[in-house]
Image: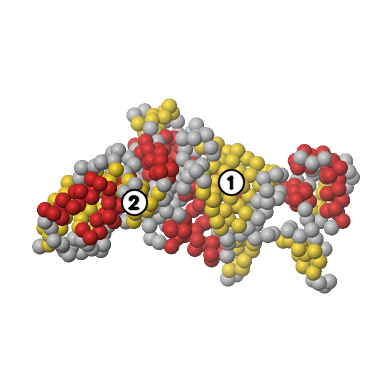
Amino acid sequence: MNLGKESETLEFKKTTGELKEAMVSISAILNKHGVGTLYFGVKPNGDVTGQDVSESSLRDVSRLVYESIKPQIYPVIQEEILGGCHVIKVEFNGEDYPYSASGRYYLRTADEDREVTPTELRQFFVANEYKEKWEKTKTQFFSKQIDKQSVKTFWGKAVSAGRLTGGRYSAQTVLKKFGLVDGDYLTNAGNVLFGSSHPVTLKAALFATDEKLTFLDMQMYEDNILNLLKTAETYILKNINWRSEIVGIDREEVPEIPVAAIREILANSYAHAVYNSNTYHEICIYPNRVTIYSPGSFASTYSPEDYINKDLQSSIRNALISKVLYLNKSIEQFGSGFKRIDSLCREAKIKYSYELSDNGFTFIFYRKIKKVSVSGKDCKIDGTVNGTENGTVNISLNKNEQAVLGLLGKNPYYTRQELAEATSKSLRTIQRVLDSLREKNLIERIGSDRSGYWETK
């Protein structure tokens, strides 16, 4: 007889010789779900092998639960016969979180028990409370205060993807179908997904150097999630490098970062964000990297590497939002996002990393340094120039020169005063930078000082 696979609420132990390990599993399951079942006499693969069951063995289990699990719980411990084999079944529950096993704290993830600190446990419970309540909480916005075009676009994509059946629909039908309204009002999930009250904020910026010093562009967008996903993607694709490739007889434009990888990270950043705070989503584009920031700590007790290297269930913070993004194919498949991104980046030879904090999650795409032509030579912005005839020549661009060159590339009509204000430098410093860039043949003044412009090379 086989009982199937272990899960986040079901654990198997071969014998009561694994009593200590069983206590760890009980505490981990209680901390994650508050209820669970454990069998002694069953292999990890679910095969029932049985074990000796006596009053003494039942008392041993009861005694160790009493001594090990704190706060106290009162499990149901009994003998059962499964497929002709005697086993011990332990059913337990509790709501007095957190629970420890012999003074240590654990959390259940998939079929594994992971030791955590009390601080991590508190963060987990705060996140869990958010997950249970926030999406379904009623807002002050009426159910009619929605962007009907967003609903129409969602429905069309979901039907085209084969994840919803076609037919007639109305915006109110969609909202009710997915639990996004409470009476006459939008829930939090309904508002951030389809609301017309500009419920979510996205800050997007383009920088002249690899530090947050000089803006070439900065935008603040306020909209719902469905619209902001497209806005964010467009902003990134507009401000990164593209190259031409010949495929057959056609010429194709290829971005330096795969579009599918950008979409996957953006969709996951909105699916797993924490929305009950004053923070916002953020995109920063630097010469050497693109960063995508999502408010709220990483939603899983596993790391992104675990999702790449293992087949794990997704830890979903916002179930309703995630479901909508899955149905319209913004999210390809639950739990596979990092695996997919890793594959796309490897294929495109793009390096990436991420940063975790209590307040947010940042994903980083590293860019290849863009080359520009300077008098027949290839000049990297980081300073190395590869000559075609005279060997290798080195040009050193400091941060001020990089910033000014970036600004002039964005707007060749900048005056010295405007450059000084944009970089927070003096007019004398700006003049020195301009003179240096001209000496290095990176810029040229076209026209008069009053009405001319700067041409970057």
Q: Is residue 443 left or right of residue 263?
A: right
Q: How many numbered marks have been drawn onto this rendered protein structure?
A: 2
Residue drawn 57% across the image and 53% down it: 364
- Amino acid found under the numbered disc labelled 2: Arg
Residue type for callout 1: Ile
Judge left or right: residue 43 versus residue 159: left
Q: Earlier in the sequence, mark 1 or mark 2?
A: 2
Q: Nearer the viewer, mark 1 or mark 2?
A: 2
Image position, residue 254 (x, y; %): 60, 61
Whether residue 165 can be seen here: no
- The residue tagged 2 is 108
Residue at x 22% of width, y 53% of height:
38
Circle 1 SS class:
strand
Residue 405, given in percent of the width and then of the height, sits at: 77, 51
Tell me the residue that label 1 is attached to: 283
Q: With 86 as the anchor, is 358 left or right in this view?
A: right
Image point (44%, 52%), residue name: 331
> How far apart, in angstroms, are the residues tagged by discs 1 and 2?
33 Å
Callout 2: helix, strand or loop?
A: strand
- Callout 1: few (<14), some (14-19), or many (20+) C-alpha neighbours within 10 Å? many
Out of 292 and 355, give the one closest to the viewer: 355
Q: How is the image coloured?
A: secondary structure
Q: Nearer the viewer, residue 430 or 377?
A: 430
